[in-house]
Image (cartoon, rainbow, N blue to C red):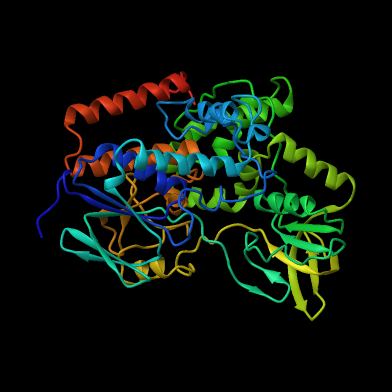
Amino acid sequence: MTRSTAASARIAIIGAGFSGSLLAVHLLRRFLPGGRVYLIEKNAKFGGGLAYSTGNPSHLLNVRAGRMSAFADEPDHFINWLRSRVASKADAQDVRGGFDTFVPRHLYGTYIQELLGNEIWQSGNGRNLFLVPDEAVAIRQRGHSLSVEVRGGRQYEVDAAVLAVGNFLQDDAGGHYYGNPWNPRALADLDPLAPVLLIGTGLTMIDTVVSLLDREHEGPIYAVSRRGLLPRRHGEAPPRSLQLSENDRSSVARLLRSVRRQGRHHGDEAAVWRSVVDALRPFTQEIWQGLTTAEKQRFLRHLRPWWDVHRHRMAPLVADVIDDAIRRRQLIVWAARVQEMSADGQGVSVRLRRRRTDQVEDVRVTRVIDCSGPQCNYDRIDSALIRDLVAQGTARPDPLKLGLDVTVDSAVINREGSASSPLYALGPVTRGMFWEITSVPDIREQCWKVAALIGRRFGADSAERLSAEIAEQLSSEIAAHPMRTRHV
């Protein structure tokens, strides 16, 4: 088969959430009229993804609106879009303030959908984009190209494919148990006075509590996790820099000691830790990739829960709701493990063992909802496509069991340890390589880089244009983080 150029390149993107949709926009802006981008999505909705498909206006972004632009070189793109919504009276009641606003997540889903729509209807790139409402179930190598098969039986011959599959949630449900908190039935037909048990105390649990309260639920809500840690509240975080030597970065223990030392005795404690975490954020991937596998495992075993609750915070309005529910003793948070669950026709009897004690709590609830987060062991993931890729050796789980093994260029690594130039991955599936790869600022940079690599491979960019774009990207990063060249 003749290898394609920019004029005829065919790219399949598996998944049309934020990462897949943004990558499609970047590719459409690069390719010549003969190129094709197949955006394959098993759900009916393109552009929203799991995170931004909620219809509940009380589910807010966990990042300030000023950091949510889809384009690093247009930092006010999302803010300007929000202002245009206010000007047109659309969702005006949900959009207040500016850079520091935490807006409803469904608005961000609408924003991504409009980006796709603009490429189709306004930018003249619609002829290059093919929306495929089906589930990709297999990918086969065909010389220098790939064949992507969807559940409906059709095959798409492409030159490269990108896995933008997002997070995989447990979707098992039986009786009074729901493994997927986003399942519409998880909260349906629930007596307002019924006791509920939520497994996990992270942001997914927070969303579920907010949904219950919005439904005027009055019964007790028990939330349990191994350490019983809740996400912290967003607040003031004055800019600061951290000085980290190579020795500081060589182990998790040294890194923690250095960060604590530099953050000690510098004003308001809450503001200090927020500033420290924010100062680490632009360099988290670099630090992560410099650690040995053993050090990464040590971090995951001992520090991950603490990092998660300080890094992934609640919007202030959401934190107020949670604090009030705890104060009223409706929300009860325990550091405990579920030892046993026994269901009958009326509900579930649950035995919990408190952390670091022999104390056992027996609770009776009407419903159990697992809010512990996505599946990460890709040896056992509930996806026909992932199972097929791993079985045939085209892909392999990463050593930390966080996703699939990829290179620093996001190319998927096969069973033999070789990178696949036609197959890439984006977003949470690449967590093993990048760790912090779930937020918009991180994913938009990854999308830009993968689009540049694919464009360069098929000649969509001349060397001069690519160099200019890289220089522009670096300038934007330096402007956003002026201390990056000397400090962390």
Q: Could you tell me residue 47's position as x and y percent?
A: 46, 48
Q: Could you tell me residue 7's position as x and y percent?
A: 16, 44
Q: Could you tell me residue 293's position as x and y percent?
A: 45, 51
Res 279 visible: no
Q: Quadrant of residue 144?
A: bottom left
**Residue drawn at point x = 44 percent, y = 54 percent:** 429
Q: Nearer the viewer, residue 191 or 412?
A: 191
- The residue lying furthest to the right in this view is 328
Asked whether, in this view, residue 290 is left or right of residue 26, the answer is right
**Residue drawn at point x = 63 percent, y = 67 percent:** 179
Asked whether, in this view, residue 274 is left or right of residue 214, the answer is left
**Residue drawn at point x = 36 percent, y = 40 percent:** 121
Q: Nearer the viewer, residue 470 or 47?
A: 47
Q: Is residue 80 above or below residue 431?
A: above
Q: Could you tell me residue 242's position as x and y percent?
A: 54, 24
Res 183 visible: yes
